[in-house]
């Protein structure tokens, strides 16, 4: 219907310009139904995490070059799945300089803090789930090692998810689809195909399922409470509450925003000289 209106609008605009009709016609905007990307159910998420390691181990012989892309894909899945960071511009804007390590005073534990400079609703800063500490460390060491072999130095202004030449990785869509297809995780029960954005939807669905405060979660994900409730609450009618940022009690947790004031944690942090991870 929307496609059919385009030539009609042009026709009536031309007719008005030629004075063939007495007034300009206005057409009501046709609402577009929201196309929600399917999320991963809990058992599928566990399978996804497990198979991300197996996927790397399958690389053999002349295909060893795929180790890099599959290693980055593994960390991409974990990081987006445990933060809800948007694929595309949002994740591409994250550089090593925008990631800081901080000992949280009231919990005596270390967490990574990430400043997202190009969020859809503006910049925001988030505290990462402790499950991700090892993934951030492993990504950095992987990059340092491959640069060292090439006789190059580590660049903290480089995108965390980058190609070998240092340019930001534009998309993981193809590799993600191939991986999901291999392990029969590409489609949900209704046959809808999963894409990288499904990782964000999985995070939101799981967090709401654990009775996360909607305002806190919306702020963390860079969205509104209205959109959060519109897109995700319907998926969680029968779930039981748990702790905020603890999507899997066996996989670590991150503090609630109100337990550790982001403003306090970040006071002067991003204005200081380079802070090594």
Image (tube, rainbow, N blue to C red):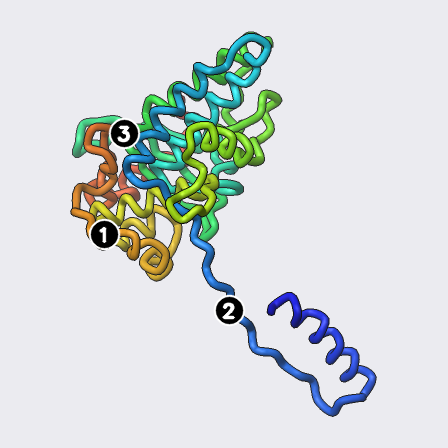
Counting from the top left corner in percent of width and height, residue 148 is at: 54, 9
Q: Are marks 2 and 3 in contact (CB under 8 Å)?
A: no
Q: Residues within 10 Å of mark 3 (few under 14, many from 20)?
A: many
Q: Look at 33% across and 28% down and name the residue there.
A: 132
Quarter of the image for residue 101 reads top left
Q: Which residue is mark 1?
A: 213
Judge from the rendering whether residue 111 lies leftward or rightward of residue 60; answer left or right: left
Please, is residue 66 above or below residue 195 in the view? above
User: SS class of the residue under badge 1?
Assistant: loop
Answer with mark 3 or mark 1, whichever residue precedes in sequence: 3
In terms of sequence position, does the residue under pointer 2 or pointer 1 come before the other? 2
Residue appearing at x 29%, y 33% in the figure: 129
Residue 153's x, y, as percent? 55, 14
Q: Residues within 10 Å of mark 2 (few under 14, many from 20)?
A: few
Q: Mark 3: which secondary structure?
A: helix
Q: Which x, y percent locates residue 133?
A: 32, 25
Percent x, y of residue 170: 58, 35
| Residue situated in front as seen by the camera: 233 or 221 | 233
Quarter of the image with the N terminus is: bottom right
Alpha carbon of mark 3 to alpha carbon of mark 1: how far?
A: 19 Å
Q: CA distance from mark 2 to mark 3?
A: 41 Å
Q: Is residue 153 left or right of residue 57?
A: right
Disc 2/disc 1 C-alpha distance (Å): 30 Å
Q: Is residue 141 visible?
A: yes
Relative horizontal placement of residue 267, taking residue 270 as reference (left or right)? left
Q: Which residue is mark 2?
A: 31
Number of labels in the image equals: 3
- In which quadrant of the rendered image does the C terminus lie? top left
Q: Are the residues flagged by discs 3 and 1 in contact, CB closer than 8 Å?
A: no
Q: Which residue corresponds to the image point at 19% horizontal and 32% vertical from the top-left?
A: 249
């Amino acid at each position: 219907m929307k496609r059919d209106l385009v030539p009609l609008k042009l026709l009536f605009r031309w007719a008005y310009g030629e004075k063939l009709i007495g007034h300009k016609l206005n057409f009501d905007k046709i609402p577009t139904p929201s196309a929600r990307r399917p999320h991963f159910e809990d058992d599928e998420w566990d399978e996804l995490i497990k198979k991300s390691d197996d996927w790397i181990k399958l690389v053999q012989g002349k295909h060893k070059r795929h180790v890099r892309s599959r290693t980055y894909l593994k960390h991409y899945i974990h990081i987006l799945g445990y933060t809800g960071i948007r694929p595309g511009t949002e994740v591409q804007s994250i550089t090593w300089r925008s990631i800081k390590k901080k000992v949280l005073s009231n919990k005596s534990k270390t967490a990574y803090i990430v400043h997202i400079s190009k969020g859809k609703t503006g910049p925001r800063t988030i505290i990462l789930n402790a499950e991700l500490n090892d993934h951030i460390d492993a990504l950095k060491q992987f990059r340092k090692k491959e640069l060292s072999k090439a006789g190059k130095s580590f660049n903290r202004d480089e995108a965390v998810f980058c190609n070998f030449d240092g340019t930001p990785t534009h998309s993981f869509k193809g590799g993600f689809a191939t991986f999901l297809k291999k392990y029969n995780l590409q489609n949900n029960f209704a046959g809808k195909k999963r894409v990288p954005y499904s990782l964000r939807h999985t995070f939101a669905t799981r967090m709401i399922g654990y009775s996360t405060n909607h305002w806190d979660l919306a702020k963390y994900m860079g969205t509104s409470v209205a959109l959060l409730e519109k897109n995700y609450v319907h998926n969680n009618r029968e779930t039981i509450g748990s702790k905020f940022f603890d999507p899997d009690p066996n996989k670590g947790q991150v503090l609630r925003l109100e337990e550790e004031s982001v403003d306090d944690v970040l006071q002067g942090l991003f204005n200081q000289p380079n802070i090594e991870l």
